[in-house]
Image (tube, rainbow, N blue to C red):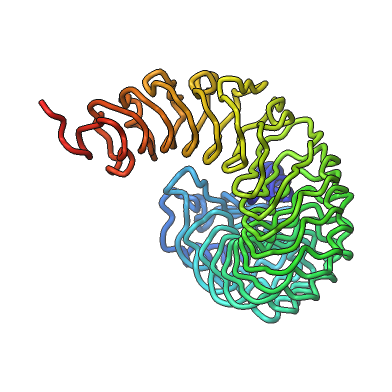
Amino acid sequence: MSSPSPLIFIFFSLSTFLHRTATAASCHVDDETALLSFKSGITADPSGMLSTWKTGSDCCTWSGITCLTSNRVTALSLSGQPNKPNSYLSGTISPSLSKLRYLDGIYFQNLVNLSGPFPNSLFLLPNLKYVYIENNILSGPFPATIGKLAGLNALSFAGNKFSGKIPSSISDLTQLTQLNLGRNLFSGPVPDGIRRLKNLTLLAFDHNQLSGNVPDFFDSFSNLRILRFSYNKFSGEIPASISNLATRLAYLEMGHNSLTGTIPDFLGKFHALDTLDLSWNKFSGVVPKSFVNLTKIFNLDLSHNILTDPFPDLKVKGIESLDLSYNRFHLGQIPKWVTSSPIIYSLKLAKCGIKIKLDDWKPTETYFYDYIDLSENEISGSPVVLMNRTEYLVGFWASGNLLKFDLVSMKFPKTLKNLDLSRNLVFGKVPKAISGLNTVNVSHNHLCGSLPATKFPASAFLGNDCLCGSPLSPCKV
């Protein structure tokens, strides 16, 4: 659930204009030399990202270069485009960047194949304020001297392969407003000294191998809006000091850990909360009644815990995504505050004790639905009316219910990629439309007839009344 940092967008929106309106003088020879040395360390540039970097031309006009101080390079911004496979750079980060003495920002994002260790050239850049070297394959340990970059306002090495412990000297970066080390291989505990970084608005350590208790140091962060600790090995309870973040925190993500205890009642005071993810932990007990105060929450994921009834009747005005699956709830009905949401796109209520006739469920809006998971309930009836009202549905999972309808009558939206109707009472033939999906399971129903040509294994169709044809047994002539 990782969002790009706000400072990046501000920078990108200005950079093109600013470098064109800088002084007409050619860039300094030291800067040109440094940049050409960097280019020489790049072994592959299939999209021509550095094609304008040519000897003898003004480097202030080169792609990705900004010059704001006389004729000196002040920012270096190179970004790949994830939807374009050839938009990447291979190679290493040349130490020659240390010659860019006026550089205050480095933005190497989604370049995919930039490799090598931590670029120690950063330590020789006295004006450096912003470092976003994200979604590459830099590796090895973080330097123990990272604290010497004391002038930094933002540091992000998210999406690399750094390993080892997070150095304790990182607590010397007291000017930071953003610290993002998510999606690496860091291990060990979170340094307690991070409590000194009192200006943080974003703190992200998600998708690592960090362990121990979640540190109890959140009374220091009066401006924190985004906290991401998901996908680690944290244990213990949610620390009490997190309650100090109630007024401003918008994103609290601690899913996929081994946290225990009950969900704290104080989370109901987080009135600015947009996203709460506590999924895939070991939380037990009831969801606090105070959650009725979370009127602005858009994304709530409490799935895969040991939570029990009753679930509070939320007063949220419009939920976007909800996942309560695989707890010990017995909801009976799909909550009214879900049914009435005009903006919901993801609803996952697998094994939530829902007992309804699906034809009778009439959500206010189905247009935005991307994902619906109602597996392992006691839902009867037909999804035909619901499916006919969706335009962008990507996944529909309803295995282990009592659905009874003719599969041929169901609409397959053009966007549908995943369908699981296994272990129901579905009858009729398997339509050709099923062939265009990515995953299918219609096993253990009452389907009959010849299968259309598909890429799916026999397990997707087993346990029906009289299906035949590849990958099952041949049909009798």
The quarter in which the C terminus is drawn is top left
Q: Where is residue 329 shown, x and y percent of the image?
A: 67, 45
Residue that sits furthest to the left in the current view = 477
Q: Is 471 or 73 nearer to us in this picture? A: 471
* Residue 95 in view: yes
Give the left or right position of residue 153, taking residue 77 as reference: right
Q: Position of residue 70 (x, y in %)?
A: 74, 56
Is residue 28 visible from the viewing direction of this image? no
Compared to residue 213, the image places residue 72 above or below, namely above
Q: Left or right: where does residue 308 sit relative to residue 420?
A: right
What is the x, y in percent for residue 215?
78, 70
Q: Residue at x 55, y 58 (%)?
A: 135
**Residue found at the far bottom of this picture:** 144
Looking at the image, residue 354 sits to the left or right of residue 402; the answer is right
Identify which residue is drawn at 42% across, 37% down.
Answer: 423
Name the one closer to the observer, 100 or 253: 253
Q: Residue at x 65, y 65 (%)?
A: 258
The image shows residue 179 at horizontal and vertical percentages of 73, 62
